[in-house]
Image: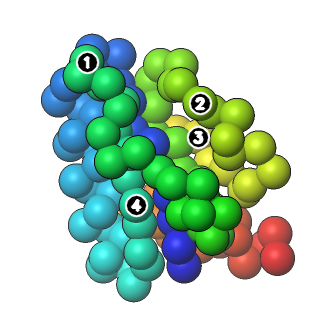
Amino acid sequence: MKIVSVCACTVGIAHTYIAAEKLEQAAKKHGHTIQIETQGTIGAENELTEEAINSADIVLLAIDVKISNKDRFEGKKTIEVPTDLAIKSPNKLMEKIEELTKTKN
């Protein structure tokens, strides 16, 4: 499964990057590919391309704040969770995504 994700916490420093790292590890463990954009105090890093978004099976937003350009995900299957869920339970989150994509196809 192809996943694109945006991670953004309230301060835009630690949790943003910890969530991104945990999601990368969990996606790899479950055999999925994931591209993650982080939005923090230094702005957006690893910005998702239109091509990446269009080819993704699902959009995962691990965010605690309003993110910029959220409208680019319109029409895509999207899951939004707080960053602490992505940090504490990334494997369960991947399992939930797998369930959701199976039932919505």
Residue drawn at x 31%, y 76% as measured from the top left: 28
Sequence-earlier tag: 1 or 3: 1
Q: Quadrant of residue 64?
A: top left
Q: CA distance from mark 4 to mark 2?
A: 16 Å
Q: Which mark is residue 80?
A: 3
Residue drawn at x 20%, y 42% as measured from the top left: 18
Q: Dot 3, how many residues are within 10 Å of its Cα: few (below 14), some (14-19), or many (20+)? A: few
Residue 7 visible (yes or no): yes
Q: Quadrant of residue 23?
A: bottom left
Work out which quarter of the rendered image holds the C terminus and state it: bottom right
Please name the residue that numbered disc 4 is placed on: 35
Please name the residue that numbered disc 1 is placed on: 41
Mark 1 residue type: Thr
* Image side of residue 95 versus residue 21, left or right: right
Q: Dot 4, how many residues are within 10 Å of its Cα: few (below 14), some (14-19), or many (20+)? A: many
Q: Which mark is residue 86?
A: none
Q: CA distance from mark 4 to mark 3?
A: 16 Å
Please name the residue that numbered disc 2 is placed on: 69
Sequence-earlier tag: 4 or 1: 4
Mark 4 residue type: Gln
Sequence-earlier tag: 4 or 2: 4
